[in-house]
Amino acid sequence: MVENRPFAQFMAYLTLALGVVIVAFPVYLAIMASTFDAATIINGNMPLVPGDQAAVNYPRALFYGGVHAREPVAGMMFNSMIMALGIAIGKILISILSAFAVVYFKFPFRKTAFWIIFITLMLPVEVRIYPTYKIVADLGLLDTYTGLVMPLIASATGTLLFRQFFMTIPDELLEASKIDGAGAFRFFKDTLLPLSMTTIAALFVIQFIYGWNQYLWPLLITTKSSMQTIVIGIKKMITTTDALTEWQIAMTTAVLAMLPPVLVVIFMQRLFVKGLVETEK
Amino acid sequence: MEKRAHISGWTLPLLLILPQMAITVIFFYWPASQAIWQSFLREDAFGLASEFVGFENYVSLFEQPEYYRAMTTTAIFSSLVAFFSLGCALLLATQADKNIRGGHVFKTLLIWPYAVAPAIAGVLWIFMFHPTLGTLSKPIKAVGIDWNPMLNANHAMTLLVLSATWKQISYNFLFFLAGLQAIPKSVIEAAAIDGAGPLRRFWTVIFPLLSPTTFFLLVVNIVYVFFDTFGIIDAVTGGGPAGQTTTLVYKVYADGRLGGDLGGSAAQSVILMIIVIALTAIQFRYVERKVQY
Amino acid sequence: MAGVTLDTVRKVYAGNVEAVKGVSLGIEDGSFCVLVGPSGCGKSTLLRMIAGLETISGGEVKIGDRIVNQVEPADRDIAMVFQNYALYPHMSVYDNMAYGLKNRGTPKDEIEKRVKEAARILAIESFLARKPRQLSGGQRQRVAMGRAIVRKPQVFLFDEPLSNLDAKLRVQMRVEIKRLQRALGVTSIYVTHDQVEAMTLSDKLVVMSGGQIEQVGTPSEVYRRPETRFVATFIGSPPMNILPGTVEAPGRVSIGGQSIAVTDMREGLTPGSAIEVGLRPEDVQAGGTGTSSLSMDVDFVEELGATQLFHGKVAGAEFIVQASTGQLPADTRRLALAVEPANVHLFDPQTTKRLGRV
């Protein structure tokens, strides 16, 4: 800023601190709730300092089932992990290959192919949810990891991101490779792939979060509770009849569910920001 | 944009593009066209036979008061979330853009809610505002409001707006901050030399220069409220009380699954597709104009 | 090693844009050929066709005795130095230089020997482990050259290799390229828009414009006897002055009523017909008098240190005269210019071709 007014600085700190407190408060409450027993929470007087039940709640949520056929959360996290990794890796794989084809080759219907992929950008899975469900059901993929992952891989985000990145690579690099005797495969492996590492990592971070947080699709196609993801599982723990809700376990699960993606954002912040900003261009 | 240099051959590129094409066609174009086709069909009560009924599903959709209510709900929900999340994010971003120590720490502390799943966000907020055990319900009740989002539609909507806004602030903040940092310092310095104070500078120089970002975010936020808030709604209110927080997307889901009205649900999907395509087209046109400018 | 022969080579882009319009050129084995011309004249396209990076729309390209029209770039036995160097950013200097050899299956110890040798010649031995981004512009330039050298190709191709360097470094690298080419004796084709580079580097200078060759010759031939008005004004700085004149008699032309003698003049030109008269700023004698002289109105003077440039008008046309500093007072308003008949160039106003003795 142009001026250096102490008051303006103070206001900036105050506003930001207030923002951070408001943003963090719901999560703080959840963490607190995961350290108390059910009774303390139910009576509505939960203290705002940690209790002593964390050592009970976390193992119980993770490894033991509960009332109304609740599955151990560890299994749900495993499912979520498979789904998130499947979506992230699958998307990266198919989109880097198709972007390579679209950018570096001339072939019949190249423009058409690009547009066919590009249009998928506009329509999220929610608007075609039942027909997609039916196709996955007809293919016998309900309650399978393939069924969870495949339909969510079909999107143009990755292809566009890689295309955009490839366009910034100077043409001369391909020409130098040609003169150096590298064919399509060697150019891809020796030059394009190493140069794309940051983009791949950024896309991975974004897609991992996207995959981990999926809700509607897994809600529809998983019927067995052993296939539940953690985001679905936690919603099922909150029953309409309050008396049956194990809030301390639900909140423990919420903390566990937030942990992987939030850690990814915090520790890979640079890649996360890059991925987020560039996939939206 | 085109590359000057290409690799020759066309069988290889076709092979390379095949996986994406296959998945896109099977899980995208096929179901999307099915949705369009089904929107013109009516199934009998047992789902055994279906007949072509033309636009009847659409007509009956627009005869339902519930559909209009869902539209109104979606409109209100979208505008409130967009307004609050953009407003808060802009305020925070302008503060974080000031040359203060520890700015990047604040940035980290503000962006992580992006990583929280919408459904989880919903769960956090119900817990906080639960009518009997919510930590923040007590002060509300203390001022004499009979707070109960399970029964009162306005309370339910308030809770939805709060949780959806909470989750979206981080995204908007990040883009606003990037937009602010992209404004050349010299322009702001020139405005200061021209005698514009901080507030005046913001409204006459910074905000107009930020308008492409704002517009982009507006569209993204509307699309976000349309689709991504499904998890929040399902967790917080389940569309209730009495269907009063049912948005268009939630209605597609509820009508198809709980009601089994696949034709009606498909017709709603098609309308949603048209809305999203229109929003995207507006955005592209705007972006193009910006590029030319 | 081998020469390069081009036979009516053409390049037509989609939309019928003809970038190279039938160029024929022989480049002798071991010589240094520079293609010079303004941007868009087709020089880079021509070079890229020789490299195999652009398809050839018509004609033939031969390297040695082999027609290479359909040969992949890797198999043409050429090496290229790009304007932006095109170093692989993720590979070390060593790997950048070794990559082409590795792809050819050259034995490891042979690769190492050649890379070390090239690094020694170019004085980049201490950078071999670094990545390109850790190098200065001049060092990157050397690596790009090294990558070409290790291959021991039949032909070196240079695509404006010095234009990304600052002025001082450019002069230094220019000398080095020349010295290196002499030492290795490899046929080299060098594209540039910089006439100083073109004059200093070339054994054979090719001036191009509009997709065609305007003139081929040694640098001094091109400078002393430009075949077209384009070459006359493109080579030389400041550019040659062109004045409108008329034919008076054999060996004499008139410029705005002032008559001058000409040595190199086509016979049989009709007296009274229009003609263009070219005079280099350094070839007219300011302050001189004689039977062949022009008068000039001076507008202003540019000081260049050792020389001064007098800007003004002769017979209504823009004119520049170069004179040694101190030779004339800076406030001179009117100059008499003596013209040596041998230094007058005549061009046809229609075809722009030289009207010299046949």
Image (cartoon, grey):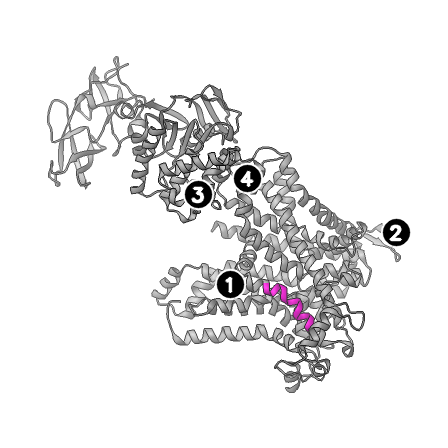
Label 4 sits on a secondary structure element that is helix
Residue extending farthest to the front is: C109
Q: Which residue is mark 3?
A: C93
Q: Mark 4 is on which residue type?
A: Phe
Q: Are marks 2 and 4 on the same chain?
A: no
Using the image, tell me which numbered label, if any, was put on residue B176. 1
Q: Which residues are magenta?
A: A252-263
Query: Camera-side residue: B26 or C329?
Result: B26
Instruction: Please give the chain letter of the residue carrying mark 2.
Output: B
Closer to viewer: mark 4 or mark 3: 3
Image quadrant holding the C terminus of chain C, namely top left
Residue occupying image coordinates x 50% and y 24%: C68
Q: Mark 1 is on which residue type?
A: Phe
Ranked by sequence position, the earlier of labels 2 and 1 is 2
Q: Mark 2 is on which residue type?
A: Ala
Q: Which residue is mark 4?
A: A187
Q: Which residue is mark 2?
A: B49
